[in-house]
């Protein structure tokens, strides 16, 4: 059996209590696994899965809510890890447990996954909650890639193209949320190539519009645009293949951070025709 020890405490009473409960569920599953007198574990396994999914969702909502409140820097990765947990549990739920041998195998696999995930997640991720600099406001949003009214300049062609840039970036974000693997590397690279091409077209249209209205900030905009394109040109495709999850996380932070700050602080100054 596994004990919830002091090194698993993160210093938040409700979240620590949630984690204790998760350890109780882990130990419950191990007890059922080891009890040879329970010759049919089907219903008990189903109950464990239901309880695990229900309680983990309650805990994840509480944890993410608290992290949103304090704008915690690990919020994005926590969402990714929580989503990964749900996906893995649902895979286990879908396995056949009609026969006793299958029941033992699935329960054993579930407990091994839960043990490894709990320790890694609590000690490796949850222990950092509240310890890092707060996120920028846009990063706290449930979907930071949503193109909302606050990003509209009032210039139809520019707003339409900005919306498209957000949509392309959102495809990368969904890969991050689902847990990027080596198998996603080609998709990520393809999306980035599409993003670079569309960004170049957008910058060209935006600069043409600024010339048409004799905007005096054109030269500064051109320099900013060239800098962004240069960053996209420097994307290391080999690094995406080596560590896709970490690379995509930093990529999303760069892409959205640049887009949002550029729109709000620079593009908003472009006068409508």
Image (cartoon, rainbow, N blue to C red):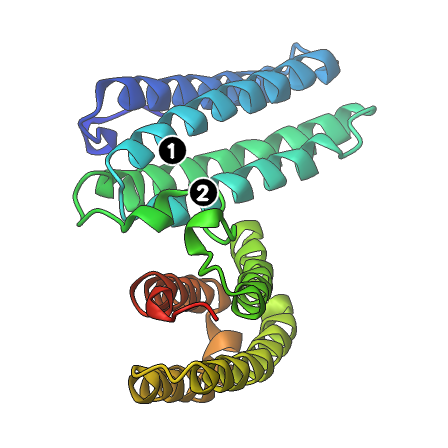
> From the viewer's perspective, is residue 205 above or below residue 130?
below
Q: Mark 1 near mark 2, Cβ–Cβ under 8 Å?
A: yes
Q: Quadrant of residue 18?
A: top left
- Coordinates of residue 175 in the picture (x, y in percent): 58, 58
> From the viewer's perspective, is residue 199 above or below residue 11?
below
- Coordinates of residue 111 in the picture (x, y in percent): 53, 31
Q: In this view of the protein, which residue sits in the foreground, 125 or 138?
A: 138
Report how far apart the C-alphas of labels 1 and 2 lie in the structure: 7 Å
Give the residue pinned by disc 1: 64
Q: Residue at x 29, y 38 (%)?
A: 126
Q: Secondary structure at mark 1?
A: helix
Give the residue pinned by disc 2: 79
Kindly tell me whether residue 93 is visible in this rendering.
yes
- Counting residues from the start of the chain, the first of labels 1 and 2 encountered is 1
- Coordinates of residue 28 in the picture (x, y in percent): 50, 16
Q: Residue at x 50, y 54 (%)?
A: 145
Q: Secondary structure at mark 2?
A: helix
Position of residue 10 in the picture relative to residue 57 (left or right): left
Kindly tell me whether residue 39 is visible in this rendering.
no
Q: Residue at x 47, y 56 (%)?
A: 152
Q: In this view of the protein, which residue sits in the foreground, 125 or 177?
A: 177
């Amino acid at each position: 059996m596994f004990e919830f020890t002091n090194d698993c405490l993160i210093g938040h009473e409700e979240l620590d209590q949630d984690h204790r409960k998760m350890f109780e569920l882990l130990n419950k599953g191990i007890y059922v696994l080891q009890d040879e007198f329970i010759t049919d574990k089907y219903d008990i396994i189903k109950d464990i899965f239901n309880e695990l999914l229900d309680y983990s969702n309650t805990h994840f909502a509480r944890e993410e809510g608290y992290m949103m409140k304090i704008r915690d820097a690990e919020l994005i990765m926590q969402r990714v890890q929580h989503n990964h947990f749900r996906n893995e549990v649902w895979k286990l739920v879908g396995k056949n447990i009609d026969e006793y041998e299958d029941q033992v195998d699935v329960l054993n696999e579930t407990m091994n996954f839960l043990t490894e995930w709990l320790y890694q997640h609590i000690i490796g991720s949850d222990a950092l909650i509240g310890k890092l600099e707060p996120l920028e406001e846009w990063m706290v949003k449930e979907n930071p890639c949503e193109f909302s009214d606050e990003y509209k300049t009032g210039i139809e062609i520019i707003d339409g193209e900005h919306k498209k840039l957000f949509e392309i970036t959102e495809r990368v974000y969904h890969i991050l949320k689902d847990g990027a693997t080596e198998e996603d590397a080609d998709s990520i690279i393809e999306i980035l190539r599409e993003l670079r091409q569309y960004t170049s077209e957008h910058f060209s249209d935006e600069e043409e519009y600024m010339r048409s209205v004799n905007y005096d900030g054109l030269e500064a905009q051109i320099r900013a645009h060239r800098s962004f394109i240069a960053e996209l040109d420097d994307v290391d495709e080999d690094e995406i293949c080596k560590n896709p999850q970490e690379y995509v996380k930093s990529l999303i932070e760069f892409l959205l951070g640049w887009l949002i700050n550029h729109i709000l602080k620079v593009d908003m100054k472009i006068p409508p025709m």
